[in-house]
Image (cartoon, rainbow, N blue to C red):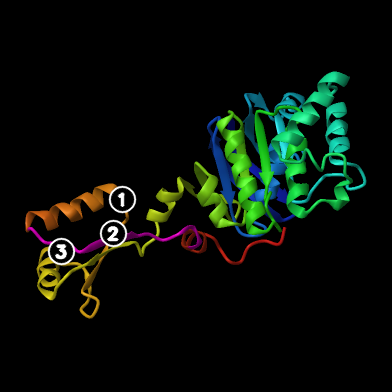
């Protein structure tokens, strides 16, 4: 649904994007992670035709970004970092305004507004001024406005910034439902838990380049520190296991061994197989892998640019 090749962008002497490549399948959530100033918002602005690139090629929903910008705009929706709702209007009026901008007929626009108010649990508040809405309600309305034109691709640029945990999880559920309906989501976020929860694939951007890409689990396995923790009922079992495994850190007081592991199914099967061959009884087994915080810190430069 989105393909990017060699995308470049500079602001004066500051290189923000230095030839990034991306490939986003249809009906998935793709998350772009990076420190402040890494180029996440710049990427979204370019792919949504709000900003021109200095070089490279990109296609969105099958349309060339440079030669077919109007077709790209017709296929996408954008929810930025800051809410775009008019707080002096009601929720319904905001949606009707967007319907007018999409040139929907009178009957269609009212039906579409009612459907979206209901879908986003805003039906009771639909005729109230948006200035009376909570932050979470405003963000839901903001996303509902993005959907008025039934886009194939939605760019969500840090959509849950400033929301409380409950509102954030409500937004996550809405995003899952959109993807289940066939929409493709391009998500930028600074909440690593959010990317872990939602993204089918994640790209980490640093210094204007994509420095890593994969599923959350694939990225976690790239970072050292993963291990399998084995606990035993007695010291004899621990000693036998240590003899079998060799490379392990022992904790005699806890009757436990910490065995280095990348967390993959293959390595876990190998470990269990070696123990099973010697009939070693394990009281408890748990797999520990680095989280996305570890991935982020390991892969990104703390000296990010200021843009």
Identify the residue shown where x is 42% and y is 55%. 220
Q: Residue at x 11, y 72 (%)?
A: 239
What is the spatial separation of the Cα atoms under label 3 and label 2, in whole angstroms? 12 Å
Residue 8 vs 283, above or below: the answer is above
In the rendered image, residue 283 lying in the magenta stretch gets the answer yes
The answer to whether mark 3 and mark 2 are in CB contact below 8 A is no
Q: Which residues are magenta?
A: 279-293
Q: Residue furthest right?
A: 88
Spot occupied by residue 45 in the image (x, y as percentages of width and height): 73, 42
Q: Quadrant of residue 106?
A: top right
Name the residue tied to disc 3. Answer: 245
Q: Are marks 2 and 1 in contact (CB under 8 Å)?
A: yes
Q: Residue 203: x percent and y percent?
A: 53, 47
Kindly identify which residue carries mark 1: 264
Please give the name of the residue rendered at 63% of the width and 41% of the height, measured from the top-left corner: 174
- The answer to whether residue 157 of the structure is visible from this angle is yes
């Amino acid at each position: 649904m989105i393909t990017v090749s060699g995308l470049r962008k500079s602001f004066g002497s500051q290189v923000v994007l230095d030839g990034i490549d991306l490939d986003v399948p249809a009906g998935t959530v793709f998350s772009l992670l990076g420190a402040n100033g890494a180029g996440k918002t710049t990427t979204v602005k370019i792919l949504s035709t709000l900003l021109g690139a200095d070089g490279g090629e990109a296609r969105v929903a099958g349309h060339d970004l440079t030669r077919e910008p109007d077709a790209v705009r017709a296929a996408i929706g954008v929810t930025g970092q800051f809410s775009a709702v008019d707080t002096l209007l009601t929720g319904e009026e905001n949606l009707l305004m967007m319907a007018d901008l999409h040139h929907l007929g009178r009957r269609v626009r009212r039906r579409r507004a009612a459907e979206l108010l209901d879908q986003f649990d805003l039906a009771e508040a639909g005729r109230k001024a948006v200035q009376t809405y909570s932050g979470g309600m405003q963000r839901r309305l903001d996303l509902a406005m993005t959907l008025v034109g039934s886009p194939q691709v939605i760019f969500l640029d840090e959509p849950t910034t400033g929301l409380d945990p409950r509102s954030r999880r409500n937004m996550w559920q809405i995003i899952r439902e959109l993807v289940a309906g066939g929409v493709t989501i391009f998500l930028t976020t600074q909440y690593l838990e959010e990317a872990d929860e939602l993204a089918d694939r994640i790209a980490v951007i640093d210094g204007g380049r994509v420095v890593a890409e994969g599923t959350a689990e694939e990225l976690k396995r790239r970072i050292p520190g993963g291990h399998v923790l084995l606990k035993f009922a007695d010291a004899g079992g621990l000693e036998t296991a240590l003899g079998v495994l060799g490379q392990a850190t022992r904790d005699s007081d806890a009757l436990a061994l910490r065995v280095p592991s990348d967390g993959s199914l293959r390595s876990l099967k190998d470990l269990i197989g070696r123990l099973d061959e010697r009939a070693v009884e394990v009281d408890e087994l748990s797999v520990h892998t680095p989280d996305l915080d570890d991935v982020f810190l390991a892969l990104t430069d703390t000296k990010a640019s200021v843009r």
